[in-house]
Amino acid sequence: MSGSPVKRQRMESVLDQLKQFTTVVADTGDFHAIDEYKPQDATTNPSLILAAAQMPTYRELVEEAVAHGRRLGGSQEEQITNATDKLFVLFGVEILKKIPGRVSTEVDARLSFDKDAMVARAQRLIDLYKEAGISKDRILIKLSSTWEGIQAGKQLEEQHGIHCNMTLLFSFAQAVACAEAGVTLISPFVGRILDWHVANTDKKSFEPLEDPGVKSVTKIYNYYKKFGYETVVMGASFRNTGEIKALAGCDFLTISPQLLGELLKDHSKLAPTLSVKAAQASDLEKVHLDEKAFRWLHNEDRMAVEKLSDGIRRFAADAVKLERMLRERMFSAENGK
């Protein structure tokens, strides 16, 4: 009898082992992938929704969003904005049928420097979910981790009880400001930090524990746990399974279907790398950041400045492509009738 647990552990995939000490989240808008890997939560963004919306499988959702935009009327721009919001929510509603936890839905990246507009758009998304019978407790609103985005998150959490997921997070300054704002969850990016170092330094490959993205998330996790912040740390944007294994024990990790598939086929032994005990023994010191201090400390990190602005531009570009697709469906088809 005593040998059976060992045998069972050898049989277990790395994905199953990871789920024992980290909440696994699927980073996709594709329902079939969510069915396959059984994550707790799911995250979406404009790029993922754009990719999924072009699949024939999801044509009905696009048509429903188009009909919603038309029904509300207004200018072409207003109809397209309403259709876009509805499409994001329709994907979220379908994803929530397949997971026990929460879905993250992103506010338009073009609003990243407008706190009031982000708050208003977030409330609109929550209202659309409410109309679909979904409680706000099952939604995380994704906001860019600019100073304005972080303050929008603070306001949404404190005044409206809306849970926020702060995305495009690359610097320690961003992480500290998010913790002080009391947001529900942060998504520090791992792979994009690695990308920057490969492109901008002489070193072109890193062992997982030396990966600059892994080191960034480890420091943030340790800081949050040492000083008792309740904000959840969810590592995101992975380039390989080595990064994921090196962050085993992190609160949450959001992982693409491709890498989930690789973890499922891997049957090596996995042990947690991060722990609250180790975090509390770290020599990190507590930092307080007002707006001026935040902007200075963030600006001192060249990688973070470049990757935040690049990330906002990329998500904005995909939002424009999505709108272009909806515009063609809504107005070109109408003109062609």
Image (tube, rainbow, N blue to C red):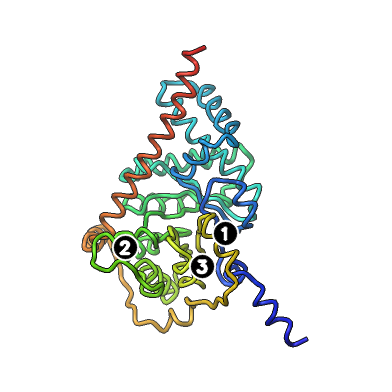
Say if 248 sits above or below 139 in the image.
Answer: below
The residue tagged 3 is 251
Q: CA distance from mark 2 to mark 3?
A: 18 Å
Location of residue 119 (image quadrant): top left
Crowding at mark 2 (Cα within 10 Å: few <14, some 14-19, many 20+): many
How far across and how far down the image is residue 150, in percent? 36, 54
* Disc number placed over residue 171 in the picture, else none: 2
Location of residue 266 (image quadrant): bottom right
Location of residue 223 (image quadrant): bottom left
Q: CA distance from mark 2 to mark 1?
A: 29 Å
* Disc 3 residue type (three-letter): Asp
How far across and how far down the image is residue 76, in percent? 41, 22
Crowding at mark 1 (Cα within 10 Å: few <14, some 14-19, many 20+): some
In-front residue for pair 204/193:
204
In front: mark 3 or mark 1? 1
Return the disc, 3 or 1, that comes first in the chain's sequence. 3
* Disc 2 residue type (three-letter): Ser
Which secondary structure lies at badge 1?
Answer: helix
In-front residue for pair 149/29:
29
Return the disc, 2 or 3, that comes first in the chain's sequence. 2
The residue tagged 1 is 261
